[in-house]
Amino acid sequence: MASPIQSKARLRTQTGCLKCRKRRKKCDEVKPQCKGCIRNGLECTWPTAADLIADRRRAPLSWKSQPSLPEVLSGLSLQHADHVALLSHFVDSICPRIVRRECRPEYFNHEYMLRLAYVCPPLMAVIIAVAAFDKETPSYDRLAMESYQFSLHNLRARIARAANAGSDDALLATTVFLCVFENLRSDTQLNLNLHLTATGALLTQRDSTETQVNPRSVTVFERLCAESFLYHSSLMMLFNPSLDALANTGYTLNWTRYFSNSQPEAEVWSNKKTQPVLDAPYNLFLLIAGVTRLARVTRPLNEGEVETWKELNYQLLEFKQTTSHDAYQLHFEAMHIMLLKVHPILPESEVMEQVYRVLQDGSSILYALDTHNNLLAYLLWPLTVLGSITVDSQTRRLVKAKIDELARRRHGLVTRTQKWLRYIWDLPQGDRAMMTRRGLRILVGGSQIGKECV
């Protein structure tokens, strides 16, 4: 008996429905039912991700042997040789940096993502944009922005045409890499909130009882996208005062769909191979987002916010007892400082005294902090908190040294953070309490100049 994969019709084109391919008829590609199937009274079905993987005519994939660019990308100022070079750079240099070193080998296999790119022009365009920007070659700068704009324009059109956007893996991958591109930029993050909101909406729309396809590669794909969304939408809130993609999505997204196979929380700290992006239990990142959101409040907390403060503080205390690792402890101290900013009971003088003590504890952790084994934003988050409020030159030099170590990763977020801290440190000097309060205020609320830096 033939296997299910062997009995499938060989795919003749990349985008037509399965019935038209089997009948060797041209498909008008109108979803959910093409005119050919309607005319002949046939059930119109479309290729899933499994078909992309199982189709023997396109396996194994080699971007270096592709005869030409996807036709719809022909409007870009991109030659075939550049396309091959940029895709090679994406696979060899960028992909290893978007997942953690210690995660399982399957998270380093991005063949499924590349297959999607060859049938989804917006995804291919943003991959080219990311690779071109990361190359830091002046001749590629224009191509990077051109490809980025191309991806945005075509993504909107594809979402508008999609019958069920939430089940389209290519759309989800496109929004994730648009976020990656925004974070590579050293100038500004104009559309990060938009991209993260779109990613969250697509993840939310995925039906927890219906999966597009069940191969291990797609399970890995979904987990990678979900963790990337949570990573960016929580940690980037500190660097973009208007960003809060989790404000709505965080309460409606079914997190257990993506993390139901996680290890017990206590085991995640010591064995994180199942997590390609997040360096801690996923609910720690939800806590970071909640603390950042509350710390933005500039008035006395109302009754509901006081209850939120108590819950966040309780969660923080619980997390502090789970691990003693330096990077995590630095996050705990940074969140403690941000919660002290909006403490509902303590007088300001006592708040400042506690901030100084926490800052001293955080500074002692900095000396032993290893900057090589964590994803970038995970370390920049607590370093930015401590750097924004410290007033003594020794601690500032230490923070600067750690951020300079991260700058070797050629990432725009590091450049923006360096500009941000230089702006705060160059402000007029005053007494310690005034400078600390000012740093906290600018940290979570920004300022006109500070926003321009970030």
Image (cartoon, rainbow, N blue to C red):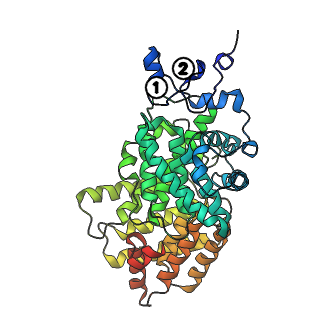
Residue that protrudes farthest toward the right in the picture: 65
Q: Residue at x 49, y 29 (%)?
A: 28
Instruction: Report the quarter where the N terminus lies.
Output: top right
Q: In the image, is 255 to the left or to the right of 369? A: left
Mark number displayed over residue 34: 1
Q: Position of residue 436 (x, y in %)?
A: 42, 80
Mark 1 / mark 2, whichever is N-terminal: 2
Q: In the image, is 48 to the left or to the right of 134? A: left
The Cα atoms of the two marked residues, 1 and 2, are separated by: 10 Å
Q: Give the crowd class for mark 2: few <14, some 14-19, many >=20 residues within 10 Å.
A: many
Q: Position of residue 34 (x, y in %)?
A: 46, 25
Picture layout, residue 385 above or below residue 166: below
Mark number displayed over residue 19: 2
Label 2 element class = helix
Picture layout, residue 441 above or below residue 252: below
Residue 306, picture quadrant: bottom left
Marks 1 and 2 in Cβ contact (< 8 Å): yes
Residue 133, picture quadrant: bottom right
Q: Position of residue 310 (x, y in %)?
A: 34, 57
* Residue 266 visible in image: no
Mark number displayed over residue 413: none
* Residue 255 visible in image: yes
Picture layout, residue 249 above or below residue 295: above
Foreground residue among 169 and 358: 169
Q: What's under tag 2, amino acid-wise?
A: Lys
Q: Residue at x 50, y 23 (%)?
A: 45
Q: Residue at x 69, y 18 (%)?
A: 6
Q: Residue at x 41, y 51 (%)?
A: 197
